[in-house]
Image (tube, rainbow, N blue to C red):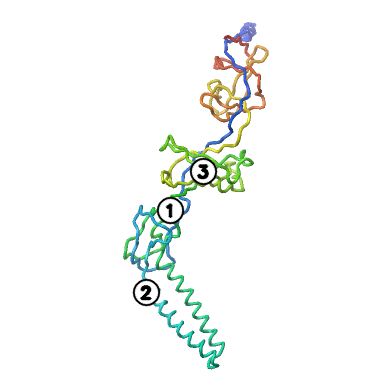
Amino acid sequence: MLFRSANAKEQERVEQVRTTVLHEREIQREISISTNLQGYLTQNVAPSLTGKIEHIYCEVGDKKQKGDDLVRMDQTQYKTTKIALGNLGIELNRVEQLLKSGSATQQQYDQLKAQYDQTKEQLDFLEQNTYVKAPFAGVISAKTYEDGELYGGQPIVVLTQINKLKALVAIPETYFPMIKQGMKLSLTSEIYPEKVFPATVEVVYPTIDASSHTFQCKIQIPNDHLLLRPGMYVTTTIGLGKEKAIVAPYQAVEKLVGANDRYVFVVEDGRAKRVSVTLGQRFDQDVELISPDIYEGMEMVTTGQHKLVDGVKVNIVE
């Protein structure tokens, strides 16, 4: 009997609270995701020839333009093949004249021409791999060997393009229909707190990662002033257009102890009702509330919610 009386007394408990009426508000829908920058292009300079490295034309940090010399390998094989091609060219011209006069057969000419073409192809290959040039403008970001060392397969130098950068961003699958190639976005770095850098979505990957429920997109970042560098940690913000949402004070949201579940209290018929919510975008001291049970016109508790339990009577004070 005493237990029932105590319980009845608890049922009659009234908590003093302050509330606010929820309204829809137009927001700029956007998502912010952190990532690391990469050089847009990276070339590991690793010739398809073994042997001695005669000369490396650069050091780490050197800027190179497209077509600049990077590495010269041992030239012996190249020079030998070049002499052989010259001799074959002379012989081919001679046989061509003999063919015209009827003193040589078409078969002789064709065999020599095939040998000449094969040697020419080999010489082109040797030239590219003996005198290695920069395939694009960039900066030398690594160097593994010195002049005179034997090349063993590791990249001799690494050329990285930094006047244009890229980043791979993992985006929650919910936003997959909204992200399109060519979309504009902004990028910020703690190193430059006052600057916002433009970027563009270049590629939207077509599949969703089953474990993380995210998809990747590749973004391109112009970097003409070279303020940004590969490896920097940045935050990308993608605008997804304007829409209406319920926004409320962040301090009114409660968190379940030992879990990440969030909830708020609303007032219905003079009693507190607990409603589970998902947090959306943050706007200074306010946050977007996402829940099928939250709608415009509801009275939500903003002060005194820490003392509430579901169903307790409340008295709204000004």
Residue at numbered disc 3: 199
Q: Are marks 2 and 1 in contact (CB under 8 Å)?
A: no
Q: Please, what secondary structure does the residue beneath circle 3 have?
A: strand
Q: Residues under labels 2 and 1: Cα distance? A: 30 Å
- Which quadrant is the C terminus positioned in? top right
Q: Please, what secondary structure does the residue beneath circle 2 have?
A: helix
Q: Amino acid type of disc 1? A: Thr
Q: Earlier in the sequence, mark 3 or mark 1?
A: 1
Labelled disc at residue 117: none
Looking at this view, is 21 or 11 the one in front? 21
Residue at numbered disc 2: 76
Q: Is residue 246 left or right of residue 109?
A: right
Q: Is residue 71 above or below residue 98?
A: above
The picture places residue 93, in percent across and down from the top left corner, at 48, 85
- Disc 1: CA contacts within 10 A as few (<14), some (14-19) or many (>=20): many
The picture places residue 10, in percent across and down from the top left corner, at 61, 9
Q: Residues under labels 3 and 2: Cα distance? A: 48 Å
Q: Is residue 268 left or right of residue 17?
A: right
Q: Earlier in the sequence, mark 2 or mark 1?
A: 2
Residue at numbered disc 1: 160
- Which quadrant is the N terminus positioned in? top right
Q: On the image, which quarter does residue 23 sit in? A: top right
The picture places residue 193, in percent across and down from the top left corner, at 43, 35
Q: On the image, which quarter does residue 46 sit in? A: bottom left
Looking at this view, is 298 or 270 the one in front? 298
- Of circles 3 and 1, the one toward us is 3
Q: Amino acid type of disc 3? A: Ala
- Of circles 3 and 2, the one toward us is 3
Looking at this view, is 36 or 113 the one in front? 113
- Disc 2: CA contacts within 10 A as few (<14), some (14-19) or many (>=20): few
Q: Residues under labels 3 and 1: Cα distance? A: 19 Å
